[in-house]
Amino acid sequence: MYTLEELKKMKPEQINKTLSEPRKNLTKEKFEARTGQAKDNHKVELARKVVARILTILNQPAK
């Protein structure tokens, strides 16, 4: 995972590439939680927060 400062320094194209892995992880965690395979249901929330943080940085206006 990248830190907040590293993400802020990246270009939008790089951030979009970085975003694909957490989104895949979120989809996997959701599937496991719905089918009863997941042992840790809180991982869905954590994955959602990671995706939200990255999208927030992506949508912030450049300074």
Image (spheres, grey):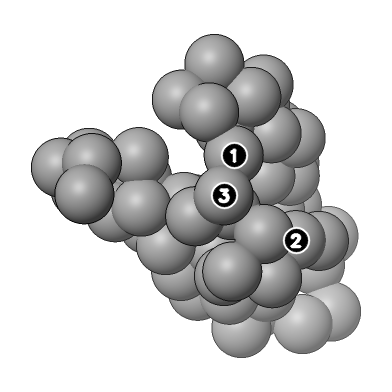
Q: Quadrant of the N terminus?
A: bottom right
Q: Secondary structure at mark 2?
A: loop
User: Residue 41 at what x, y percent from top left?
Assistant: 65, 78
Q: CA distance from mark 3 to mark 1?
A: 4 Å
**Residue 38 falls left or right of residue 8:** right
42 lies above or below 37: below
Q: Are marks 2 and 1 in contact (CB under 8 Å)?
A: yes
Q: CA distance from mark 3 to mark 2?
A: 11 Å
Give 8 or 25, whichever is nearer the viewer: 8
31 lies above or below 13: below
What residue do we see at 69% from left, 33% from top? 18
Q: Earlier in the sequence, mark 2 or mark 1?
A: 2
Q: Which mark is residue 9?
A: 3
Q: Residues within 10 Å of mark 2 (few under 14, many from 20)?
A: few
**Residue 54 falls left or right of residue 59:** right
What residue do we see at 42% from left, 62% from top? 53
Q: Which mark is residue 2?
A: 2
Q: Nearer the viewer, mark 2 or mark 1?
A: 1
Q: CA distance from mark 2 to mark 1?
A: 10 Å
Q: Please name the amino acid that badge 3 sits on.
A: Lys
What residue do we see at 36% from left, 52% from top? 57
Q: Answer with the quarter of the image where residue 56 lies.
A: bottom left
Q: Secondary structure at mark 3?
A: helix
Q: Are marks 3 and 1 in contact (CB under 8 Å)?
A: yes
Q: Please name the amino acid that badge 1 sits on.
A: Met
Q: Please name the amino acid that badge 2 sits on.
A: Tyr
User: Residue 23 at what x, y percent from top left?
Assistant: 60, 36
Question: Could one spot residue 30 in this view of the protein?
Answer: no
10 lies above or below 2: above
Q: Which residue is mark 1?
A: 10
**Residue 59 falls left or right of residue 57:** left
Q: Secondary structure at mark 1?
A: loop
